[in-house]
Amino acid sequence: MDKTINQKAWFLVLPVFAVVAFSAILPLMTVVNYSMQDTFGNNQFFWNGVGWFKELLDPSTDLGGRFLASLGRNLLFSAIILAIEVPLGIVVALSMPREGWTVAVCLVILALPLLIPWNVVGTIWQIFGRPDIGLLGYTLNSLGIDYNYVSNEFDAWATVIVMDVWHWTSLVALLCYAGLKSIPDAYYQAAQIDGASRWAVFKAIQLPKMNRVLLIAVLLRFMDSFMIYTEPFVVTGGGPGNSTTFVSIELVKIALGQFDLGKAAALSLVYNLIILIVCWVFYTVMTNAGAERPEKKGAA
Amino acid sequence: MARIDLVDLAHSYSGNDAPPESFALKPVTMTWRQGGAYALLGPSGCGKTTLLNLISGIVTPSRGKILFDGADITPLSTQKRNIAQVFQFPVIYDTMTVGQNLAFPLQNRGVPKAEVEARVRQIADLLDLTFYLDRKATRLTADAKQKISLGRGLVRSDVAAVLFDEPLTVIDPELKWQLRSKLKALHRELDLTMIYVTHDQTEALTFADTVVVMHDGRVVQSGTPAELFDKPAHTFVGYFIGSPGMNIVPAVVSGHEARIDGHVIGLHRNYGVLPAGAKIEIGVRPEFVNIAAPASGLLAANIERIDDLGRARFARVRIGDAKFAARVPPGFSASDNSVGLVFDPAHVHVYADSRLVEGVA
């Protein structure tokens, strides 16, 4: 093949390079730079090498202890909300109407929580759960259940989890619904003729056909929940104690609370890396599991 | 295995109150015997798939009844009807292997394991799928997938009928031929009632012992391929079956004679006096009209072109304004465009308002 060599084409991508450099690479390198230094304010920096990274991974230090504890909480949180939102989203999608005007109504209702800004969601649940004036908190307490998300760790976790389920199950449901809608009628008809039960139809047709959208749903929900900041910060402020302090909240405390830019920078890099790696592993595993590669030499 | 009776069966997609002319399937009453191979033949939109879906229960009829061996099954759901159906496009259960796909209809009905296995082996053998039994079904080619669909249709031995809805659409022409003969062989081997929907006359005529021709929601004729060819009951059948189709020309018919533009053509039967006001036409297949040199006793025509189909040559001619097709006898060569037409009286049929008129011998 003859390819015309034209180095001028590089000039065409130059603007993109410039924009990406200023918007992503330079700030990132600044963070990398900070992560190798220590500062005592006053814009004075001292070289620290990989010191912060060593500390981060060592639970016996203050920084490492706080990081690993919040990381553990974050992983637990993500696991719990995935375990609830994915099955719940599927159930919601399955029970939605397939045609008629009710479809539009359902879609709008489902989309509503997704349209509310994060800090508003936090505020809604913060007030909703208050034992003195909140509908949920007051009702629970009048029923004799001692519920207080400010002082009780379990209650705080429950509130944050229920809030996330309320906020994001819709996303999973909408994605699943789109996946379900794309299944041709012939599949259901064939299943009817094959005498498949409702459960068999779900297992043999609906779940496999939702494979791809579920992958997207799980990825989105994992990333989002792993980066969660605003809602728990507004509701519990990371408390009681440190019980709902997730990695992002810890990060802000270190960066803005203590102004430890070096530690914060090192933490952000590791945090970023974890998300990238988990998503990559996840994506690779899931796509390989559901790979559809028709063999070149099929049945004859 | 069952005899299937359709009693006054009709369907409209816009409800029972729709005007009768708009029905997708106009009232039909017919009987399909156990073990028969039937083809529903007709152009797109003629109601053949509707009829199939009514029998399988995917669609509930607006009117009429369906009987399996005399028992009314109209209100039963598809699952309870004991019907197998193969669709136009392959339907494969993605997560299962080929074997599991084939076993699925049996497992759902609680057939004992050993029996399932034996039956799956038998069907896989018949369809040349044995080699693929343990493979994931998603990784196969479109025609292998369609074979699995066919297999799922055939795997149950107790079905009242197996319905095929243009199952070979996605298959390559060469494989199509193989699969069709395979189906025919399976029909003989398994003794199942099979109903095959298609718009391809070759497919219908090679597969079925009885072909049901549908047109505009009506069954216009049902008979063996030979009957459809020799004695079309409706001008549509004459035209739709055969290549080229039957010649249909307006004519004046009385007694033993038909007149086209004043020229007399002898008829085999006596038609007496036909109802006044009806549109009278004669129909004759191109195979039974020969081209000859123009002569005084022959109907004069002009050749437009000659199609060489290999096994035979057909001339496209004009009689006045009417188009006509006729056979060119071997060795015939026209000196110029004007020729005469020689009719075989035994194969000239008379139609009044598109329907065949039976003459008196």
Image: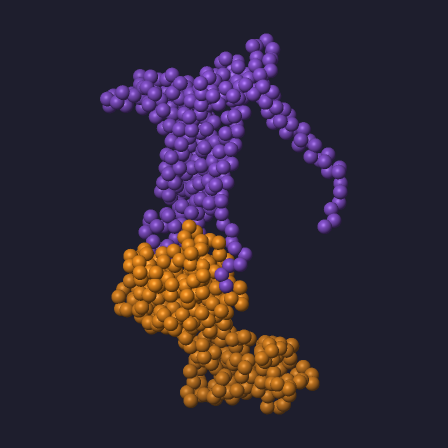
- Name the residue: 44% across, 79% down: B227
Left or right placement of residue B215 versus residue A194 in this view: right
The colour chain B appears in is orange
Q: Quadrant of residue A135?
A: top left
Q: Quadrant of residue B302?
A: bottom right
Q: Residue furthest bottom?
A: B296
Task: Please state, as top left, top right, bottom left or bottom right, where the N terminus of chain B lies in the image.
Answer: bottom left
Left or right placement of residue B138 versus residue A48 in this view: left
Q: Position of residue A300 (x, y in %)?
A: 50, 63
- Name the residue: 35% across, 66% down: B161
Q: Quadrant of residue A147?
A: top left
Q: In this rendering, is residue B161 above or below A35?
A: below
Q: In this rendering, is residue A169 above or below A146?
A: below
Observer able to see residue B78? no
Q: Position of residue A274 (x, y in %)?
A: 50, 29
The number of numbered badges drawn on the structure is 0
- Name the residue: 42% across, 50% down: B95
Task: Please state, as top left, top right, bottom left or bottom right, where the C terminus of chain B lies in the image.
Answer: bottom left
- Name the residue: 54% across, 56% down: A296
Observer able to see residue B264? yes
The colour chain A appears in is purple
Q: Position of residue A185 (x, y in %)?
A: 42, 53
